[in-house]
Each structure stands twice: as structure tokens, then as C-alpha cells.
Image (cartoon, rainbow, N blue to C red):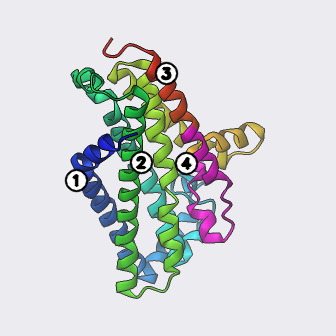
Amino acid sequence: MSGIIIGNTLRTAWKQMLYWGLGLGLLGMYIVFIASNSDIVQGYADLFESLPPALLTAFGASSAEFFRTTEGWVVTILVSELALFLSVYAVLAGLAISANEEQSGILDVVLSLPISRRAFLLEKWLAYALLAFGTVLISALLPTLTAIGLGIDADIGIIFASILAVYPSALIVITVTVLLSTLFRRRIAAIGAVAAFVIGSYMSSIVGSSASGPIADLLETLSYFSHVGGESIVSGEYEPGGTLALLVAAGLGFALSAHLFDRRDIGT
């Protein structure tokens, strides 16, 4: 691995990281600004108490009580929205690793250079993994600094850690996008498949957490949204097993992608 592909990718794609990070960070700042008014927070908490469990789950909470603390409000609202928006960013990043260049015919030229297919895919994947982390970091810093500046009564460390905990979910979506792009070859088919994966995972999280029984438990376990960890960090019940499972799954998914990418024809 020479690092040339990583460096070139970072140079050409850092602006997307900055724009996405600033956009998501501004969303976080807005939510923190709302949280600085305790009357508004309590008003929303009263409203959420009337919602059915399925809708509460869509907001990333199992109980309306999480909305009654400032950090609970910020984390519950912000982390659930960040997980969705970052999934969109992750799909775009995953497509940029190989599918976009293969669709345009550029990949044929790149792979004619003295670099193996696996090394190319690995460097691109690592580059976008770094860019995704930078996006999450920026989106965590802006609301955290806003909370400090406003002097809100909340555990700033919990807010920052909860936002960073979204990163493994973005990495798994990037990896799944690369894998599906390798399997389906056609970009439009890969986009449809990964969209189904994201939507299916989101719905599985809602159904699994709002229902009971072994099937519901399985659906919740299989959904990457269920392992984001925002609520568990607020409640002090965070277990790293879910995060570790996502990181291991991302590594295994990339290994399978690299194996398939190395064996198939390009551009057909």
C-alpha cells in the first residue's frame, strides 16, 4: 500500500467532509440552542409522553423521560437525526470508492497503473473512513462548543461522546455500499439495494424496540441503528459490544468486497 490513493482522495474530497460536517454541526447547534431553554424542553417532554412507543423509537428514545434532561434532549433528538443523515453521506462516500469511477470508465485507467485492485480498494476505503470520521468529529464539535458557550446545565462529555458514537454506523453503510456496488456492478442497482438496506435497518430498529418477542429482538439486533448508543450513553448503560460488532462487521464486509472486486471484470 503506497498511500498515493489515500492522499489523492483526501485532497479531492475534503471539502465534502467539511460541508457535511458543518451542515450537521449547524443542526446540532440549533438543537442545543433549543435545549438552552428549559421550558421548551419540558414542553416537548410533555408532548412526547403522549406518543406511542413506535414514534418515540423513531426519535431515538424508549421513554419520554429522556427528553426531560438537557443532555437527554440533545442526544436523543440529535443522534437519531445524525444517524439518518450520515447514512446518506455514507452511501455517497461508498459509491465514490469504486462505483462512480467504474460507471464513468475512469476505473479502467486507474487500474492500468502499477497498483493491485485490493490495494486500490483498501486505500479508497480507508480514505473515506477517515473522511467520515472527520465529518462526525466536526458535527460533534459545533454543538459541544455551542453548549459550552451558552453555559447550559448538561454533561458536555456525554453529548460529545454520544455524537462520536454514530461513526461506526456510517462506516458500516460505507462498507455495505462498496460490497453491493461490487456485487451489482450497475450503479443504479447498487443505490437501490443500499437504500433498501438503510430503510430496512431503520424500520427493523423501530419495530424491534417497540415490540416484544424473539423476532422483535432479532430485528433490533440486526439493525445498525440499534447500536448507535446515544440513549445508553445518557443512561450510563452503554456497552461497547454493539459498537465493536459494527466495526468487526465493517472489516469483514470490506474483506469480502475486496475479494469479489479482485475476481470480477471491471466495467461490464
Q: Earlier in the sequence, mark 4 or mark 1?
A: 1
The amino acid at mark 2 is Ala
| Residue placed under numbered mark 2 in the picture | 129
Q: Position of residue 101 (x, y in %)?
A: 26, 28
Q: Which mark is residue 133?
A: none
**Circle 4 — which element?**
helix
Q: Earlier in the sequence, mark 3 or mark 4?
A: 4
| Residue placed under numbered mark 4 in the picture | 225
Q: Nearer the viewer, residue 87 or 118?
A: 118
| Residue 117 left/right relative to 201 | left
Q: Nearer the viewer, residue 6 or 96?
A: 6
Q: Position of residue 48 (x, y in %)?
A: 53, 64
Marks 1/2 in contact by CB < 8 Å: the verdict is no
Alpha carbon of mark 3 to alpha carbon of mark 1: how far? 30 Å
| Residue 178 left/right relative to 138 | right
**Circle 3 — which element?**
helix
Tell me if residue 155 comes above or below residue 259 in the rendering.
Answer: below
| Magenta range | 226-251
Alpha carbon of mark 2 to alpha carbon of mark 4: how far? 18 Å
The amino acid at mark 4 is Phe
| Residue placed under numbered mark 1 in the picture | 15
